[in-house]
Amino acid sequence: MTARRPTLAVWKFASCDGCQLSLLDCEDELLPLAGTVEIAHFLEASSAVVNGPYDLSLVEGSITVPSDIERISQVRAASRRLVTIGACATAGGIQALRNFADAPEMAAVVYARPDYVRTLSTSTPISAHVPVDLELRGCPVDKGQLLEVISAFLAERRPDIPSYSVCVECKQRGNVCVMVRDGVPCLGPVTHAGCGALCPAYARGCYGCFGPMDSANMPSLLATFRACGVGDDGIERMLHTYNAWAEPFRSALDDEVDSR
Amino acid sequence: MGDAVHPRPAVISRADLPALVDAIRAQGYALLGPTVRDGTIQLGELGALEDLPIGWGDEQSPGSYRLHRRGHARLFGWAVGPGSWKQMLFPSRERMWSADRTDDGFVIRTDDTDAAQAARKVAFFGVRPCELAAIAVQDRVFVHGAVPDRSYSARRERALVVAVDCGEPSGTCFCVSMGTGPSTGPGYDLALTELDDERGHRFLARGGTDIGAQLVRGVPHRDADARDHAAADAVIASATARMGRQLDTTDLPALLERTLESPRWDDVAQRCLTCANCTLVCPTCFCSDWVEVADLSGDHVERWRRWASCFTLAFSTVHGGTVRASARSRYRQWLTHKLGTWWDQFGTSGCVGCGRCITWCPVGIDLTEEVRALRELDRPGAAP
């Protein structure tokens, strides 16, 4: 008896394709992957499409136009397991900055004929619309974590995706803390691990690409940022990036100002 | 035991110290020690004595570390950096074993583990007294427990310890309070005190084991005289007087036991990031997580051990959820274990007073301050 290979589908919503590229970037593992699963729908890689349902769907991108809402429901209905990949699908992405502003006004600034554009006033994560089995963080996702999710799916085990801070990865890697050594503001203590503490390894503060960690204490870290000389503008710039719409990044500045 | 184990202390001049390093190497030891890297003093492989942080010093305070040049050429004129010998004996990530599927089952391999590959003799050169005490604390966990840890024990057995008394404590040091320094306690093969005065730059050397004593005998030296001893005593007295912090350890386990509901825990929880930095820089924290990884085919699996921290939610996650959901409960767990219940479990304090958890906390939480506040609020008549 030969077991049927599980089918894998990759879907794109509002995104830059970077997370899908992370999958293609798994050079050494791509052939074993193709031998283990049937890549049934992955337009970034192949125009050959196998009809669903699919055993595992990886969803990139956020929901930004009315047609997305219907399409994500179809994807969900056709998927046994649905995993969001990256900050757009998990938190709304950089395009969720529109959520803090007036979307029609922004469209008017950007497009010559904004009346041609049908867009929602918000960019929202997939989980705001359909049930999601797992959310993989990052802008972009880490390919090691992506392979871990697929391996875990195949072995029917829980994936090893720690939700603690980037600090843990810094210490495991032997990085020196840039806040303590240089007084550089770093989002690492409130940011979800996964990148392997990439930026601090190069003496940069963490940008928060993986979004908030599981018990982020924003007021305490922001108070320390202020002691490092960072003002409201600086804090807003740090928080308003790829995971701006994810709580508690989303309202950290407001909460902090309110509590003063 | 006599002269072989406790020979008379000797004096080795700075100029002759390279001979000591050569003698250690000649015995087949790889030399590990402190060196300046990434703007801090860290532990790593030393090529030569010149790789030590010669002429460097540090300024440390809660949440801050700065390295700077001193106006001298001392080799050990600094306090401990972010790394500790823990990383050499209990690495942050370690493959414990792997397994491969075979036609009729699977085979387990242990010959590819880090412990097997680390089967080399290493000399820990420049271990500070607080760090020596920390190694002894971890030995109780990994070597003297009911089930000795194989890989830690293997590394520990092969380690030669050259300790160096502390002459320059930092602003976050409190080894005097914990009874671990600034003079070197037991457990060394060879202990040095760096002396740099009108009689020259030299090292008072004391063998703690046969091998340590032999090393001293093998390099140019003279017997230490009363003035050398007085100079060494002065180094210790000066360091003792310049501790950056103090921790009143009077009845500490009992204090912690009766202050479990102190409002101070809420106060510190507001500041604590639960980022885990304190536990990861702590030279005695020993918790680990065991993780199994498999390749896509499922034909090859590996079991890894990596540092864990009681500040993470995952640490206390059991079936049904997390036991210590609040920052309050996690900080309290760490502090009460480190300073209190560690005694019940291992017969010692879990804290050696190195100050790393104070310096390397991004928001500068100071456990000596937290204990002081708990004590203050515990006084009869104290305002709640």
Image (tube, rainbow, N blue to C red):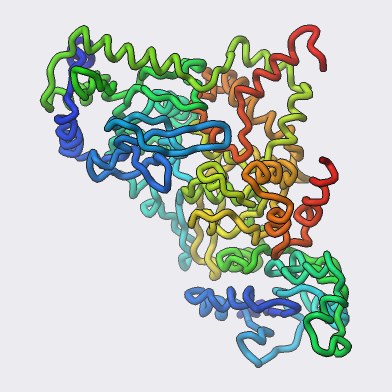
Q: Where is residue B170 in the image (x, y as percent from the top left)?
A: 46, 27
Q: Where is residue B295 in the image (x, y as percent from the top left)?
A: 52, 66
Q: Position of residue B251 (x, y in %)?
A: 62, 10
The image quarter containing residue A84 is bottom right
Residue B69 left/right relative to A190: left
Residue B253 shows in this picture: yes
Q: Position of residue B116 (x, y in %)?
A: 35, 47
**Which of the image's four quarters has the C terminus of chain B?**
top right
Q: In this view, does A197 lie above or below A60?
A: above
The image quarter containing residue B180 is top left
The image quarter containing residue B78 is top left
Q: Nearer the viewer, residue B23 or B57?
A: B57
Q: In this view, does B72 lie above or below B9?
A: below
Q: Which of B40 and B72 is in front in this view?
A: B72
Q: Is residue B340 above or below residue A40?
A: above
Residue occupying the point 81% across, 53% down: A251
Residue occupying the point 73% across, 37% down: B327
Q: Nearer the viewer, residue A106 or B288?
A: A106
Residue A74 shows in this picture: no
**Which of the image's four quarters has the N terminus of chain B?**
top left
